[in-house]
Image (cartoon, rainbow, N blue to C red):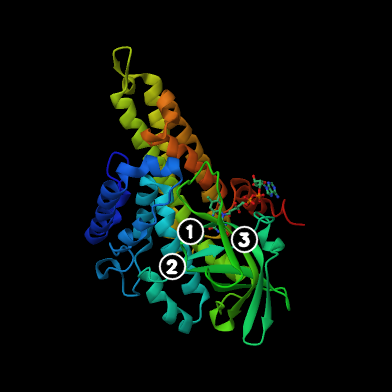
Amino acid sequence: MTEAPTDVFGYAARLTDAEAAKLTALRELLEHRARPHLATWWEDAHCPAHLRKEIAALHLEDDPSIVGEDGEPRPIYVGFRHLELARFDMSIGTLYGGQVGMFRTLVRRGGSPEQVERWDPRIRSFDLTGCFALTEPDHGSDVAGGLETTATREGDAWRIRGHKRWIGNAALSEVIVVVARDTSDDRVKAFLVPRAAEGVTVRDVTGKIALRMVRNGDIELRDVRVPESDRLQRIDSFADLAAILADLRFVVAWNAAGLQIGAYEAALAYASRRRQFGRPIAGFQLVQEKLSRMLGNATATLALAVAITDARRNGGADEMQAALVKGWAADRARETVALAREICGAEGIRVDNDVARFFADAEALYTFEGTREMNALIVGRAVTGLSAFTR
Ligand SMILES: Cc1cc2nc3c(=O)[nH]c(=O)nc-3n(C[C@H](O)[C@H](O)[C@H](O)COP(=O)(O)OP(=O)(O)OC[C@H]3O[C@@H](n4cnc5c(N)ncnc54)[C@H](O)[C@@H]3O)c2cc1C
């Protein structure tokens, strides 16, 4: 959880003692096990995959002390958990969040009751790991209409053919949720494809300037056979899939808040220890103005994260609300990390001072979960009734 003065309005007070204790345990683990190596891992583009099991062992998702009667943790706690991870490092956040957020939600919401019963306990315990493959080399923003990966029914199985790109945690996952178009009726379906299946090739996307520790995969699927029993039975259209993804959108606001809080705290620490003209630069008016803008951005983003989480509890944020929050939060994140980098002068471009890592990682946040532009166009469509991107 964040503490005053970063959590200016005290939103963390909404957490129960047990939830706060879980987040403290997470923070301590990250500080001890990851902090000393963070800059090196980032620079070497090394994925600290071993941390996933260590974080899972904290039972941040399934400890009886933090689950309700439905067996699930509360959304506000889930939000703060994302914030805590992003505040530390978004790559490590993806390592954990890609499993319990994206993968688990897709299976729980997209699977039949029998499939959920079969897979969910193993997903929760990280015994079965997975990732989500929608984006393709030739289709990012327009993937809803442009999906080229195909699935052809052959008896009690499917033959999948296609190419996916940018898939987070792909090389670390036992199964890949592949979204494909049914060749018989053009409808969208989703399949649990074992990474080790014949016909699957996964290569890392290299040369990234953001989320360098995340293993984003480029995946080729050459006539991969998947049994009908491994198709998510409740996803039968792009609209079914989009509804599940929309329910996950609230997470991006928490990530944006966490990233900004991390950058702000790193810049404040640097400004307090760096001396120029005989005193700490933190005492200069222009530096304080930057700190104030950063804290304002982070606070407003956190307030929106709480608001969209509350909307979710009351039936869910609509598409326009989710797009407004994502687009606005991404803009604020970019501004905040740029101010942090500015405060640190030359040291602001060195990864050892943390700020450079947040600066670069904000670029990934800007693009995934719908680019800032596409989210702006979704808001534009809602307020004008005119779609600027579909005809
Ligand atoms: C770090 C990272 C992790 C990711 N993880 C995953 C994952 O796990 N699974 C997955 O499926 N995908 C993942 N993605 C892919 C991500 O969802 C896409 O990058 C995103 O949807 C944008 O697609 P694109 O990169 O192909 O950009 P493009 O769609 O090619 O867009 C390029 C530019 O054109 C703009 N543009 C496009 N169309 C319009 C229009 N009509 N009007 C105005 N501007 C337009 C965009 O806003 C953007 O600025 C990840 C991406 C990143 C960077």
Closer to the chain start, of discs 1 and 3, is 3
Q: Is mark 3 within 8 Å of ligand 1?
A: yes
SS label for mark 3: strand
Q: Is residue 335 above or below residue 3?
A: above
Q: Which residue is at the front of the view, 245 or 386?
A: 245
From the viewer's perspective, tell me whether residue 140 is left or right of residue 255.
right
* Residue 341, x across and y down, in percent: 44, 30
Q: Is residue 137 above or below residue 114?
A: above
Number of labels in the image equals 3
Look at the image and tell me in which quarter the C terminus lies: bottom right
Residue located farthest toward the top when viewing the structure as drawn: 277
Q: Amino acid at mark 1?
A: Asn
Q: Is mark 1 within 8 Å of ligand 1?
A: yes
* Residue 31, x across and y down, in percent: 28, 46
Q: Amino acid at mark 2?
A: Thr
Q: Amino acid at mark 3?
A: Lys
Q: Which mark is residue 129?
A: 2
Closer to the chain start, of discs 2 and 1, is 2
SS label for mark 1: loop
* Residue 125, x across and y down, in percent: 35, 70
Residue located farthest toward the bottom when viewing the structure as drawn: 155
* Residue 314, x across and y down, in percent: 44, 65
SS label for mark 2: loop
Label 2 crowd (10 A; few <14 / some 14-19 / many >=20): many
From the viewer's perspective, tell me whether residue 282 is left or right of residue 136.
left
Residue at 63% across / 67% down in the picture?
221
| Residues at discs 2 and 1 in contact (Cβ within 8 Å) | yes
Residue at 34% across / 36% down in the picture?
265
Tell me how far mark 2 sits from mark 3, CA to CA: 18 Å
| Quarter of the image where one finds residue 319 | bottom right
Residue topped by disc 1: 169
